[in-house]
Image: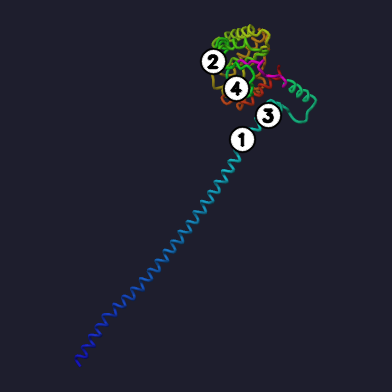
Amino acid sequence: MYRIYTRRSRRLRFFSSFIPLVLILVVGGFIGNRIIQNSNKGNETILGEANQIANVVQNETKNENENTIINNIENSTTDNNIENSVNSNTSGNNDNNVINEDKPNDNKTEDNKTDDNTIKNNNKVKFDSSVAFIGDSRTQGFIMYNGLKEVEDYSYIGLMVDTAITKEFIKTNDGNKITLLQDMKNKKIDRVYIMLGVNELGWSYPQVFKAKYEELIDEIRKVKPECNIYVQSIIPMTKSKSDSDKIYNNKNVAKFNKLVEEVAEEKNVTYLDVKSVLVNKDGCLPEEASPDGVHIDKSYCEKWLNYLKNNP
């Protein structure tokens, strides 16, 4: 009996010690499996969220690229419109553009018809190689903006009534430089237009300006005794420029223009009041007509040319 009991006791002790181990393994396996499943679900959730974010970013990028393309197309179209507008405004006959601008309306009265005919007739006046212009940088701009490529260009930056006689700035075919009077001597010139005086506004003795202007006219007549000489009024400054400058102001311009008129009368040459078609009611160059208050923009250079055509 004792042996049998002992054997049973040993068996019970063995199973009693083994069962907890099995339970631990089973429970541990179950818990581990749940953890793995939850982990996989978490990974799937993270991957799903990541895919959603990627799709949103991709869509936003696509939309941004599409917007960029649309903006580029719109900008390109705008630039082309601007360019086409500029080309259409500058193409064709600039003189006709000025004439159309001067017409008050399309319903012409008899007086308007007469004026238009006068303009058309005067537009036949040619500004070719038989015409010479003497002047400073303002005249340079006038010739350039109006495309007067055939005229004899005797303009020079900073030119004055005294240096116009002596300065050697005309290039010859052999590369040398001569005065405008030397060059004029060998050219067939019928008309000479002069506009000088801006650079002389600071001269202390205005009468010297008048004397040198008369001397220039005398020298031109020596080389071209048969040509017609036109002296043009000095164009005033804009109000902002005039009010801010002690020298280049409209008070001085008015004083020197009086001297130019005296020169024209005493030397029996034609005085052209160019300023009359360029200034506003205050006698100033309009602000929009000049980038710096002194030099004239393209549209006002065209008005200047139109005035010359109407006063041949």
| Gap between marks 3 and 4 measured at Cα | 20 Å
| Gap between marks 4 and 2 measured at Cα | 24 Å
Q: Say whether marks 1 and 4 touch (CB < 8 Å).
A: no
- From this view, report whether residue 303 is shown above or below residue 202: below
Badge 1 marks a residue whose secondary structure is helix
Q: Which amino acid does label 3 sit on?
A: Gly
Residue 109 occupies quadrant: top right
Q: Look at discs 2 and 1 and give the one toward the viewer.
A: 2
Which residue corresponds to mark 1?
83
Q: What stretch is highlighted in magenta?
A: 123-134
Badge 4 marks a residue whose secondary structure is helix
Quarter of the image containing the N terminus? bottom left
Q: In this view, does 153 lie to the left or right of 309?
A: left
Q: What residue type is labelled 1?
A: Glu
Quarter of the image containing the C terminus? top right
Which residue corresponds to mark 4?
141
| Gap between marks 1 and 4 measured at Cα | 23 Å
Q: How far from the left and from the top, in percent, is residue 62?
A: 53, 51
Which residue corresponds to mark 3?
92
| Gap between marks 3 and 1 measured at Cα | 15 Å
User: Which residue is found at the position 36% from the left and 74% from the top?
Assistant: 30
| Gap between marks 2 and 3 measured at Cα | 35 Å
